[in-house]
Amino acid sequence: MIFLDRGRTGDDPYLEWKVRLFLAGAVVALVGMARGSTWLVSGGILILLAGASLRFFRRPGADLPREDDEDHGPD
């Protein structure tokens, strides 16, 4: 079985926007393919890339340790 844990902890603050942009980009691209419109397909791809770029944005202070975190390292 494959586990896709990439060491992330906590909730993704941009998850809802990633899903929204993916759905919007997919719909725009599919409509563009159905109509044979290259500008709609290109627009859909740009929307998909915008959603994918959200993975590089982080919440301010997300890398800082929280006060309620305890050190679970070796003593």
Image (tube, helix red, strand yellow):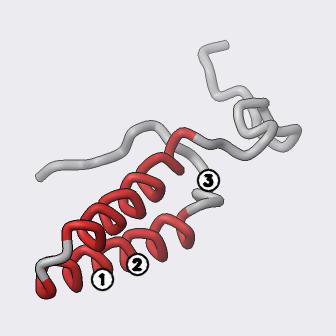
Residue at 53%, 50% (x, y): give it.
54
Residue type of the residue flagged with mark 3 = Gly
Q: Amino acid at mark 2?
A: Ala
Which residue: 78% across, 30% down? 64
Callout 3 crowding tier (Cα within 10 Å): few <14, some 14–19, many ≥20: few
Q: Which mark is residue 39?
A: none
The quarter of the image holding the C terminus is top right
The image quarter in which residue 22 lies: bottom left
Q: Nearer the viewer, residue 14 or 10?
A: 14
Query: Element at badge 3?
Result: loop
Left or right of 57 on screen, residue 40: left
Q: How many marks?
A: 3
Percent position of residue 2, x then y? 16, 49
Q: Please state the horizontal and vertical placement of residue 4, each as a whole percent of the image.
A: 29, 48
State yes or no: discs 2 and 1 in contact (Cβ < 8 Å). Answer: yes
Q: On the picture, is 37 further left or further right than 59?
A: left
Residue 65, quarter of the rendered image: top right
Q: Please provide percent x and percent y for residue 53.
A: 47, 46
Residue indicated by mark 2 = 24
Q: Nearer the viewer, residue 11 or 55?
A: 55
Q: What's the CA distance linking mark 1 and mark 3?
A: 30 Å
Q: Is residue 35 left or right of residue 75?
A: left
Residue extending farthest to the top is 75
The tag earlier along the polypeptide, 2 or 3, is: 3
Which of discs 1 and 3 lies nearer the camera? The answer is 1
**Where is mark 1, residue-wise?**
27
Q: Secondary structure at mark 1?
A: helix
Distance from disc 2 to disc 1, alpha carbons, whole Å, reads 5 Å
Residue at the spot of label 3: 10
For the residues bearing labels 2 and 3, Cβ distance under 8 angstroms: no
Q: Position of residue 50 (x, y in %)?
A: 47, 55
Q: Amino acid at mark 1?
A: Val
